[in-house]
Image (spheres, rainbow, N blue to C red):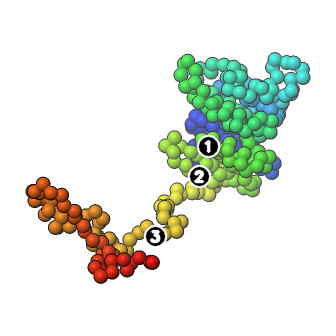
Amino acid sequence: MLQDLRASCPPGILIITDSAFHSGREILLSFLLAALHRAEKVHIFGFEWSQEEFLAGFPRELFPSLTFHDGFSDPLNWRKSSQSLTLQDFSVKRIWAQVGCPGGPVSIVLDSLSWILSRCPLPSVCHTLRELSRHQTKDGLHEVHVLALLHSDLHVPGVMRSVCLLADAVIDVKERGEGQKVTIVHRKRSGRVVTHAEHVRVCDDFSLETISEIGTEPESTTEVDPTESLTFNPRLSEADRELKESAILPYTFSNNKKLSLLQSSGGSAKIFYDPDPTDDLDDEDPDDDLDV
């Protein structure tokens, strides 16, 4: 599944979560290489690594198709350089001002989203990510791929959940052994969510090799019972159903009353009384049901 996602990479947000022990940077570079092979324009907004370190070992013939925006050398802009990337540049307007008009599909790489989250409010970051993936200009809606690296061991679970819920796909890098174990959660346009786990290896040329597939988690087919947690039983047994069907509904006219209403009256008013089963009709003591 990771191979298919790397080859097609549908528009939207793709987040790679890793930790200090299990880096996902190699997978990020592999997806970046696939974007270049699809003739996409790639813009890297680098905060954690310098350009030389980030692109070490990358094919130099592909360098003209990518642009590195440096947020590593001078993040506080002490040198007052117009080329330096700061936190104020992390906004939809400023990012697209640097990307320009790509004239086709474009990949925006954030390295890393953890560096940004540690310095920017979470709601602002989430809003920027969503607006980046839906960017629209006068020419129409561009095909935008947002690729971001997120270090799970630097954030509380609530932050991780909030950011990952925005993503169209999340690749979680877990352990090293025979390659890397990754778990992919892919939210398709139809609304269907697919979870898949496999062992992969990133080769020296940043191509991807699938070692083994652990499997796809099936979608839950168990129907939820809405009456499970109720304190009463809303269902009727056969005896309850028969009793309900045989009960006389309130305000139901008796046969005598129906006949009287159908007959023409002589101008005098009549009072009809249909006694209830619990009415006391004892003429000798009409008040014996009162507690006095």
Q: Position of residue 148 (x, y in %)?
A: 70, 38
On the image, numbered disc 1 is attached to which residue?
169
Q: Earlier in the sequence, mark 3 or mark 2?
A: 2
On the image, numbered disc 2 is attached to which residue?
195
At label 2, counting other C-alpha atoms closer than 10 Å, the crowd grade (few under 14, some 14-19, many 20 or more) is some
In which image quadrant can residue 146 be found?
top right
On the image, numbered disc 3 is attached to which residue?
233
Q: Which of marks 1 and 3 is nearer the N terminus?
A: 1
Report if the CB atoms under discs 1 and 3 are less than 8 Å apart: no
Residue type (three-letter) at the residue carrying disc 1: Ala
Per the model, the C-alpha gap separating discs 3 and 2 is: 37 Å
| Of 120 and 14, the residue lying toward us | 120
Which residue is rendered at x = 67% and y = 51% of the image? 182
Q: Position of residue 255 (x, y in %)?
A: 17, 67
Quick check: 199 left or right of 253?
right
Q: Is mark 2 on a helix, strand or loop?
A: strand
Q: What element carries label 3?
A: loop
Residue type (three-letter) at the residue carrying disc 3: Asn
At label 1, counting other C-alpha atoms closer than 10 Å, the crowd grade (few under 14, some 14-19, many 20 or more) is many
Which residue is rendered at x = 16% and y = 62% of the image? 258
Looking at the figure, which quarter contains the C terminus? bottom left
